[in-house]
Image (spheres, helix red, strand yellow):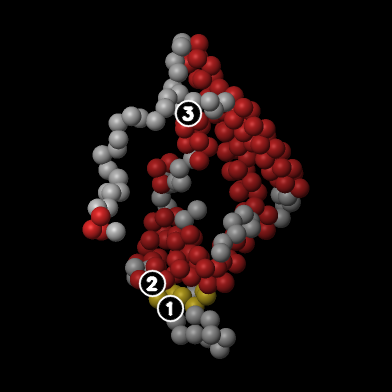
Amino acid sequence: MSLKHSILAVLTLGDCHGYQIRQEIESRTGQTYEINIGQIYSTLERLQRDGFVKPKNPNREGQISYRITELGRSEALDWLNSPITVATQVKNELAIKLALAVTIPGVNTDTILQLQRIATLQNLQTLTTAKMNADQSDSNDLAWILILDSQIFNLEAELRWLDHVEGVLTASAARGLNPQNDLNANQAKRGRPIKSEGQK
């Protein structure tokens, strides 16, 4: 989730202070994301620095609200109206872990795949139950249902991908391919230089 753009999107509705922004984002995403208030304020500082928001004078409680600038409004609308591409999303930790696992001698990828499949099925069952318990006729539950659907589809896709990985590894083993190898004997060209005696 882009916290920067989520904050800007909320501020298109009107001026808010940090706690209001957090409450709005969390409520509008079905309480799916818990956001640290420190993250909100550090992001607001960067948004102010970049000219996307302007702080207002503190209220009687000392809270500072923020107003979106035209530049910030344009940025928010561009984000809302642009597709999210895979390249802009966080790297998939599971894919990276499995890619590393198949290359490390002694690691049992069959066990990793089986444990991951069990965990994914358990998560899928939990989310499916949560969706069944959601009130589809309640407009307040709509955002929550949309998030649940997205997570359910992702988990279903993950299960299909795990099956695919298992098939690829089985076929590779049948062809005699072994991707496992030890550390590269050639030293990397870059690295922290060794300090000379005079630098200690």
Visible residue check, residue 163: no
User: Could you tell me which secondary element the residue under label 1 belongs to?
Assistant: strand
Q: How far is the residue under mark 1 from the one under mark 2?
A: 8 Å
Q: How far is the residue under mark 2 from the one under mark 3?
A: 46 Å
Q: Nearer the viewer, mark 1 or mark 3?
A: 3
Q: Nearer the viewer, mark 2 or mark 3?
A: 3
Q: How far is the residue under mark 1 from the one under mark 3?
A: 52 Å
Q: CB atoms at circles 1 and 2 under 8 Å apart?
A: yes
Q: Position of residue 6 (x, y in %)?
A: 49, 60
Residue drawn 64% across the image and 32% down it: 115
Q: Position of residue 164 (x, y in %)?
A: 54, 23
Left or right: 103, with 142 as reference point: left
User: Could you tell me which secondary element the residue under label 3 belongs to?
Assistant: loop
Q: Earlier in the sequence, mark 2 or mark 3?
A: 2
Q: Amino acid at mark 1?
A: Pro
Residue at the disc numbered 1: 55
Q: Nearer the viewer, residue 103 or 132?
A: 103
Left or right: 79, with 142 as reference point: left
Residue drawn 23% across the image and 58% down it: 198
Q: Nearer the viewer, residue 83 or 23?
A: 23
Left or right: 21, with 46 as reference point: right
For the residue carrying disc 1, how many other residues have a C-alpha within 10 Å: few (<14), some (14-19), or many (20+)?
some
Residue at the disc numbered 2: 48
Residue at the disc numbered 3: 104
* Residue, far front: 197
Visible residue check, residue 99: yes
Q: Position of residue 60 (x, y in %)?
A: 56, 89
User: Could you tell me which secondary element the residue under label 2 belongs to?
Assistant: helix
Q: Amino acid at mark 3?
A: Ile
Q: Amino acid at mark 2?
A: Gln
Q: From what the image shows, is residue 195 above or below residue 129?
A: below
